[in-house]
Amino acid sequence: METLIQLDGVSYQVKGKVILKDIDLDLKKNEVVALTGPNGAGKTTLSKIIMGVLKASKGRVLIENQNVEELKLFEIGRKIGYMFQNPTHQIFMSTVKEELSFAMKYNKCSEEEIEASVNTMMTAFNLDIIGGHLTYHLSQGEKQRVALATILMNKPEYLILDEPFKGLDEEHKQQTMEYLKSIHKQGLGLMLITHDQKVIDAFANRIIIMGGGRVEEDKVIGPTD
Ligand SMILES: Nc1ncnc2c1ncn2[C@@H]1O[C@H](COP(=O)(O)OP(=O)(O)OP(=O)(O)O)[C@@H](O)[C@H]1O
Ligand SMILES: [Mg+2]
């Protein structure tokens, strides 16, 4: 399987403080990577560098062999769906249904197509009953699910999710994992930034452990089917 995302000697520093040091990685679409490590290890920073939100101080990031610095943010976002550690600020339409419809409306899809896709996604994420609710009033766990469902409406090739299960109760966590597993089977690559050992055990086939801005361990723990 070809590499989708490649990091060559990526370092990042702010105000003289080294946050990431010499990171080399290759990420493939047939993997479910768990990126883990203690608070402050640099996981979120690394994901933001991949997405082009932050610029590496040294080294380079390639997405399908193109340097991210030569890509526009929306071009990266079209390939790689990204969910922030706190996705609250990622939601900007007033109702759940409008939020989910946004990308398809923007792309001038027909009303019928939009309705069908939005309904499928709402069912997959158990959002039917809150479809008409104001996004502003949603609970943390609901916002999390709406943000993820919205990202998936864009049909990305790869997903980077920063602590996606944190606000979720057990039932929604299971449901979300099952859904992610099913779309992984259809060819979507995944990086889950998580501290949750249960998620790692149940889901990941490669685990990357960071510590102090470095990759401390990178191991394949299961088949990449
Ligand atoms: N803009 C910034 N200025 C100064 N320090 C920063 C900045 N952004 C991040 N850091 C520091 O870089 C380190 C890595 O932060 P990062 O958010 O990437 O960690 P993390 O592994 O995602 O942690 P967590 O598990 O808590 O989410 C931390 O020590 C953090 O305080
Ligand atoms: Mg983080």
Image: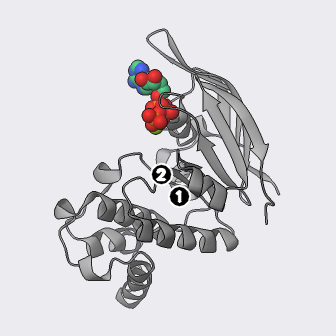
Could you tell me the amino acid type at mark 1?
A: Arg
Tell me which corner region of the image, top left, top right, bottom left or bottom right, holds residue 171: bottom left
**Residue 26 sits above or below residue 118 on the image:** above
Q: Residue at x 62, y 53 (%)?
A: 200
The x and y percentages for residue 158 are 61, 58
Q: Is residue 182 left or right of residue 109?
A: right
Quarter occupied by the C terminus:
bottom right
Within 10 Å of disc 2 (Cα), the crowding (few <14, some 14-19, many 20+) is few
Q: CA distance from mark 2 to mark 1?
A: 6 Å
The x and y percentages for residue 150 are 40, 66
Query: Circle 1 sits on which residue?
Result: 78
**Residue 64 sits above or below residue 52 on the image:** below
Tell me which corner region of the image, top left, top right, bottom left or bottom right, holds residue 26: top right
Within 10 Å of disc 1 (Cα), the crowding (few <14, some 14-19, many 20+) is some
Q: Which mark is residue 138?
A: none
Q: How is the structure coloured here?
A: one colour
| Marks 2,1: beta carbons within 8 A | yes
